[in-house]
Image (cartoon, rainbow, N blue to C red):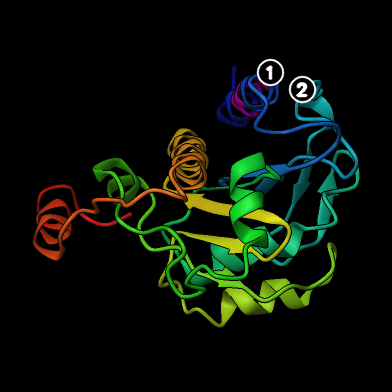
């Protein structure tokens, strides 16, 4: 199996895992992964639960469609992370329930909507801003990510859902899962007084494990 064939197989495997566990429903969500001569991305209107490896879309770094089915209409979200964060090897965009719920709340900190609740969200995701609402498929969302200058590994799209970048496919998927589970904790504990990690504890995590 060639390197690209393996990546395609991994996209199918991990996408189905996300779908089967409820991180994605219907045809929601899209996943991409960089390969040597371009980017593989799930096709538009496809279900993460039943992807065909041979039909996964391939585009050039310039966005040109090379092969496979038509790419996701939100391909610009992915390209923005590849362009603004050169170490990006994969991007996961979901409509997962709790992240989407958090993105709909009016009273969260738009600059940092995921407070330091657990060490793992700090280690795998880091600070997460909420970007202003734009309709799905609007390329302005890509520009909003570009304008962040590669500072963040993840964002929440207001009233829409998360977009998460990682060094490789597995780390991007794991970070998206960690972000969803942290959002779930925040929603579940919303009416309670919380104990967050201190600035010193957050700094220690960055020193020991590095930043996402």
Q: Residue at x 50, y 52 (%)?
A: 165
On the rendered image, what quadrant is the N terminus found in? top right
Do the numbered discs 1 and 2 sit on residues whose CB atoms are within 8 Å?
Answer: yes
Q: Is residue 78 above or below residue 9?
A: below
* Mark 2 secondary-structure assignment: loop
Q: Main secondary structure of the magenta part?
A: helix
- In the rendered image, residue 206, in percent from the top left (x then y), is placed at 17, 56
Q: Which residue is mark 1?
A: 20
Q: Residue at x 88, y 45 (%)?
A: 44
Residue 166 shown left or right of residue 70 in the figure: left
* Mark 1 secondary-structure assignment: helix
Sequence-earlier tag: 1 or 2: 1
What is the magenta range? Answer: 9-14
- In the rendered image, residue 126, in percent from the top left (x then y), is placed at 35, 57
On the rendered image, what quadrant is the C terminus found in? bottom left
- Which numbered marker is on residue 51? none
Q: Is residue 37 visible?
A: no
Closest to the observer, 101 or 44: 101
């Amino acid at each position: 199996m060639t390197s690209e064939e393996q990546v395609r197989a991994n996209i199918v495997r991990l996408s189905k895992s996300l779908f089967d566990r409820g991180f994605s429903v219907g045809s929601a969500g899209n996943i991409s992964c960089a390969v040597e001569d371009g980017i593989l991305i799930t096709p538009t209107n496809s279900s993460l639960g039943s992807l065909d490896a041979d039909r996964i879309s391939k585009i050039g770094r310039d966005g040109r469609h090379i092969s496979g089915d038509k790419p996701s209409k939100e391909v610009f979200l992915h390209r923005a992370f590849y362009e603004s964060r050169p170490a990006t090897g994969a991007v996961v965009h979901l409509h997962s329930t709790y992240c989407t719920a958090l993105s709909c709340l009016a009273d969260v900190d738009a600059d940092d909507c995921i407070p330091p609740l657990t060490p793992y969200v700090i280690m795998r995701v880091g600070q997460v801003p909420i970007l202003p609402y734009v309709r799905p498929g609007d390329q302005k969302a890509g520009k909003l990510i570009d304008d962040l200058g590669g500072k963040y590994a993840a964002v929440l799209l207001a009233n829409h859902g998360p977009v998460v970048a990682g060094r490789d496919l597995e780390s991007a998927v794991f970070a998206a899962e960690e972000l969803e589970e942290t959002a779930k904790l925040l929603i579940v504990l919303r009416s309670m007084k919380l104990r967050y990690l201190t600035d010193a504890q957050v700094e220690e995590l960055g020193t020991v494990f590095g930043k996402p």
